[in-house]
Image: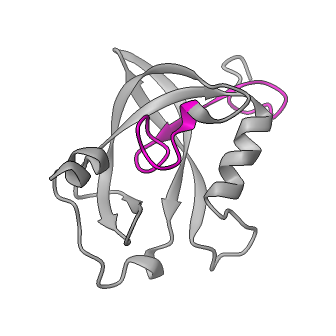
Amino acid sequence: MPDGCSDPSHPRRVFVYGTLRRGGSNDITRLQPAPRFIGMSRVQGTLYRLGGYPGLKLGAGGWVVGEVYEVEPALESVLDLIEGLGPKPGDEYAKRSVLLSVMGTDMACFLYEINPVCVNGAPTLPGGDWLEEMDD
């Protein structure tokens, strides 16, 4: 556990791609305990518009842009509540671990992936950038 990503008592890194991004309606930088910005990154997948928020489905598709933050366990719990994370397979989001490149360094992060049943018929955001798409 040298990177602090598997031990719940240590800070972990989160990849945020939607309303949790800086300037979004759930801006992570306004939450406590304050996160530490690491850098920008991207993950392969498809971004869906689900009304006032997006959903990310990992895998083939395009690239989804986001920000990586280091968060304390207490903030991770807040993020779980915001994302409505629950223990059941039918919940809207699931927490996933991914390996991302941030400023040329690979690092383990977690992100919230949308349940595929929640995106049936939802429009995609081909640019993969929630904040840019919302400015259009």
Q: Nearer the viewer, residue 85 or 22?
A: 22
The residue at the point 31 percent across, 59 percent down is 47
Tell me the magenta residue range: 5-29
The residue at the point 26 percent across, 46 percent down is 129
| Left or right: 44, with 25 as reference point | left
Image x and y of residue 57, in percent: 39, 62
Q: Quadrant of residue 118?
A: bottom left
Q: Is residue 19 magenta?
A: yes
Total label count?
0
Which quadrant is the N terminus positioned in? top right
| Left or right: 132, with 53 as reference point | left
Q: Main secondary structure of the magenta part?
A: loop
The residue at the point 16 percent across, 58 percent down is 126
Image x and y of residue 3, in percent: 66, 19
In this view, 83 is above or below 77:
below
Q: Nearer the viewer, residue 112 or 97?
A: 112
